[in-house]
Image (spheres, helix red, strand yellow):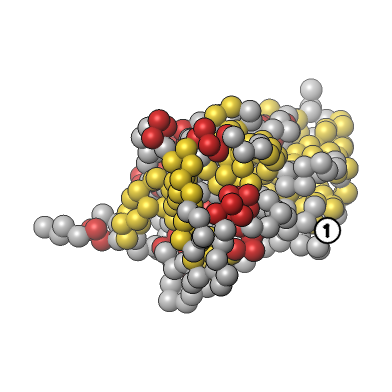
Amino acid sequence: MDGSLESVSGPGRVAGPEEGISTQELALAARNHGLPLEGLRYDVTPPGLHYVLVHYDIPAVDTTGWQLAVGGRVRTPLALDMAALRAYPAVTQRVTMECAGNGRARLSPRPVSQPWLVEAVGTAEWTGVPLRTLLAEAGVEPGSVEAVFTGADHGVERGVEQDYRRSLPLAVATGDWPEVLVAYAMNGQPLPPQHGYPLRLVVPGWYGMAHVKWLREVTVTDTPFTGFQQAVAYRLRQSADEPGEPVTRIAPRALMIPPGFPDFMSRERVVRPGFVALEGRAWSGYAPVERVEVTADGGETWTDADVGRQAPHPWAWASWRALWTAEPGRYVLSVRATDAEGRTQPLEQPWNRGGFANNLVQHVPVLCVSD
């Protein structure tokens, strides 16, 4: 009998040509829920609707003894309990957070992992202490290059037993655009358990893997971090034997609130003839969203939507709205976003082995029926 970790934790792979969703992937999908797309109507996502991805288990937490350690290459190591953290001036930021694997299940061949469609997103108001404030108090030593963040969640992935750890370049960790938060509240309330209670990292503009939950250690280093979640996972690669590029900032995306009403199983939408309001949200981790376009004819023609202002919340999604004149028949509605740096959503998605940063345009099948 094989008693190795590899016997319960296989290598990453892509699905075969006719391979459907496995029971293992279904179990992941049951644990990690997405945002019901009608939830896009909220400027700020209620915590229970915000997407969730938990790599291992939600850890049991004793807040009476919880401390955040700030150490490594610092002059004055810190050990901060929750009362000490709350004594710092609080900062609140509205931030749109998206899973790096959002859209993975739509790729072909499909990477085998959490089978997201387009729903792995949410926007919340996070309150906490700027990370740069804590690092300034600790005193970062010259020559330091990264800050490494350790969560309390522990598990095994591809045969590697580990705590969940990620790092950020020191320029990001100590910068003010974005201003990284050590957050203890979500939408004005203590963090829910699934969102990292009692403490998590929030990195505006970056995909969700950077927002380490159940945060317990910040370690400043003079060498790049090479742990599993940094050097093996979350890389854009075409084959398993290449190093790939790291996943970092969120690619532009627009999502539509599905119009009309749905069929229970297929989720195909039904609308009546006439003017139909198309609405949704758009965001980018690089620059403000500058343009949103919609199409009802497979991309032959695109119509500009009205885009709301992101200020004073530059790291949160913008609202958009357009009118469509529906006539009886079947349609596929699509929407795409373009940010101020010219990045736009592709009509055909480039493939990568992990299924990361997939911002292919959304497609919404609609049936228009007469009264």
Q: Residue at x 86, y 30 (%)?
A: 274
Query: Where the N terminus falls, by quadrant?
Result: bottom left
Residue 366: name its quadrant: top right
Q: Residue at x 52, y 32 (%)?
A: 83
Can the viewer see residue 294?
Answer: yes
Can the viewer see residue 282?
Answer: no
Residue topped by disc 1:
340
**Where in the figure is residue 10, as x and y percent of width and height?**
31, 60
Q: Nearer the viewer, residue 184 or 239?
A: 184
Residue 281: name its quadrant: top right
Q: Which residue is drawn at 56% across and 72% down?
A: 143
Above-or-below relation of 289 to 31: below
Residue situated furthest front in the rendering: 76
Graded by Cα atoms within 10 Å as few (under 14), some (14 to 19) or many (20 or more), the crowding at tag 1 reads few
Residue situated furthest top in the rendering: 371
Q: Residue at x 40, y 45 (%)?
A: 152
**Where in the figure is residue 102, as x and y percent of width and height?**
57, 51
Q: Which of 205 and 65 is in front in this view?
A: 65
Above-or-below relation of 119 to 298: above
**Where in the figure is residue 189, as x and y percent of width and height?**
59, 27
Helix, strand or loop at label 1? It is: loop
Query: Where the C terminus falls, by quadrant?
Result: top right
Horizontal side of 37 relative to 32 (left or right) equals right
Horizontal side of 230 relative to 189 (left or right) equals left
Q: Nearer the viewer, residue 289 or 189?
A: 189
Residue situated furthest left in the rendering: 1
Above-or-below relation of 108 to 308: below
Q: What residue type is labelled 1?
A: Ala
Above-or-below relation of 91 to 340: above
